[in-house]
């Protein structure tokens, strides 16, 4: 039995569909029993269990997890749920995968296996720099500098909007921070407005943000310098993050920004070292489907016994080559040496100055 909490949500529904029929039955859970039943009837042809369960009800959550071989958490906001679903899964003797969850305390697993941050961001954003570094290392030693630009134009689901608002809290990451001389430097970078970036279809705003995942990966790769930017088309969502009083309001602002335009999402990584500068880009029209592909991949890897016992971040245990292969149909990925190094933090050229 595979339990998918938030299984009729945006990420959860696609994850459940990707897992159906591969390794047994599926149990779909969420606070709305009717929505769970409708999803099982319509999307799974009735082949699954529908459960009404609230992650904040410990008894109900324990019942949901009991009998599951693995619990896949696609409910959110993850910054509110933290590790409560992981703890319930391990207590029930199940393995665990989380589409998000980078800030969750790493709890004891009771001998089971858990993979957190198994989505796009966090997830691919940690895995792909490691992949680039591994590819570069035979050609010139350790990587020195990493530049990351992730974002685009997309809707915000209720859970994602909640996480977006909560990400402003210092413990989840640091706005404007950079990584220099092997350590985090507060307020090291400034936002860049109306800039052109390779692979992004028009002018964007690039906002520096050093997440807990970015900091961990920079430290583990031994980078001297790293700059991570959240990229947005338009300034409405960024402004809304400080003015919106609820996730629903922020989701409406994102909807307005998107109106009549084509959604897109780009993950752009540049790694510089003695080997030169290599660029990895992943492009998709649906960042939620991309997240679901990674979440489902992680669940399959755990079910196949490819991940050792204990709790891991996805980027540290998944095989990037296999993950990239599983993204086919959802996203395109390309690695190239042909893109010149981007440097948004370089001093601006002053017109008229010699
Ligand atoms: N790593 C990544 O790149 C990435 C990308 C996108 C999303 N995510 C994360 O993945 C999670 C899901 O995102 P989403 O876009 O699928 O959100 P969504 O469309 O809002 O779906 C959330 C699902 O969780 C359920 N849910 C919410 N609160 C719950 C609770 N207390 N107990 C049980 N179920 C609950 C919702 O149903 P009810 O409200 O009816 O209960 C819904 O089914 C979020 O944490 C989000 O931040 C990660």
Image: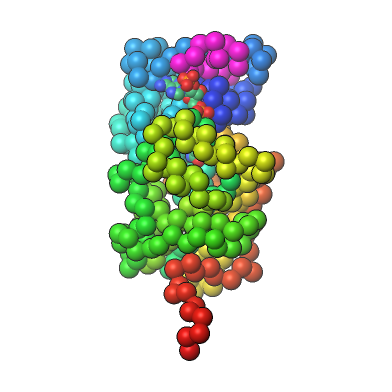
Identity of the residue drawn at 36% across and 53% down: 175
Is residue 38 covered in magenta?
Answer: yes
Total count of labels: 0
Q: Residue furthest right?
A: 329
- Whether residue 2 is visible to the viewer of this picture, yes or no, is no
Region of the chain picked out in magenta, as a range: 24-39
Identity of the residue drawn at 35% across and 30% down: 80
Q: Residue furthest bottom?
A: 354
Identity of the residue drawn at 58% across and 46% down: 153
Is residue 90 covered in magenta?
Answer: no
For the residue pair 96 and 333, the one nearer the viewer reads as 333
**Scheme of colours in the image:** rainbow
Identity of the residue drawn at 55% across and 56% down: 204
Point out residue 107 in the picture as x, y percentages from the top left corner.
30, 32
- Whether residue 186 is visible to the viewer of this picture, yes or no, is yes
Point out residue 97 in the picture as x, y percentages from the top left corner.
46, 31
Q: Is residue 113 above or below residue 50?
A: below
């Amino acid at each position: 039995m595979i339990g998918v909490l938030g299984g009729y949500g945006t990420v959860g529904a696609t994850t459940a569909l990707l897992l159906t029929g591969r390794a047994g039955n599926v149990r779909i859970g969420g606070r709305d029993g009717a929505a769970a039943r409708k999803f099982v009837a319509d999307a799974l042809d009735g082949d699954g269990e529908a459960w009404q369960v609230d992650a904040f009800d410990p008894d109900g959550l324990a019942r949901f997890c009991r009998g599951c071989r693995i619990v896949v958490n696609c409910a959110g906001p993850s910054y509110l749920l933290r590790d409560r679903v992981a703890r319930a899964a391990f207590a029930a003797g199940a393995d665990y995968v989380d589409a998000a969850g980078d800030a969750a305390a790493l709890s004891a697993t009771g001998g089971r296996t858990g993979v957190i941050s198994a989505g796009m961001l966090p997830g691919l954003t940690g895995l792909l720099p490691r992949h680039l570094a591994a590819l570069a290392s035979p050609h010139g030693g350790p990587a020195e500098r990493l530049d990351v630009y992730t974002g685009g134009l997309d809707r915000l689901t209720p859970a994602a909007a909640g996480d977006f608002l909560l990400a402003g809290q210092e413990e989840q990451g640091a706005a404007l921070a950079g990584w220099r001389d092997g350590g985090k430097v507060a307020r090291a970078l400034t936002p860049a407005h109306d800039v052109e970036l390779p692979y992004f279809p028009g002018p964007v705003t690039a906002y520096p943000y050093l997440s807990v995942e970015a900091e961990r990966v920079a430290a583990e790769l031994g980078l001297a310098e790293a700059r991570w930017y959240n990229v947005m088309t338009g300034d409405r969502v960024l402004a809304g993050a400080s003015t919106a009083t609820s996730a629903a309001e922020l989701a409406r602002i994102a909807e307005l920004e998107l109106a009549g335009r084509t959604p897109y999402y780009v993950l752009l990584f540049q790694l510089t070292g003695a080997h030169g500068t290599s660029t990895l880009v992943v492009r998709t029209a649906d960042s939620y489907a991309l997240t679901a592909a990674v979440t489902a991949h992680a669940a399959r890897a755990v079910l196949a016994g490819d991940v050792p016992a204990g709790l891991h971040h996805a980027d540290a245990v998944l095989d990037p080559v296999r993950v990239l292969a599983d993204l086919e149909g959802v996203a395109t990925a390309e690695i190239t040496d042909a893109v010149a190094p981007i440097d948004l933090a370089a001093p601006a050229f002053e017109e008229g100055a010699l």
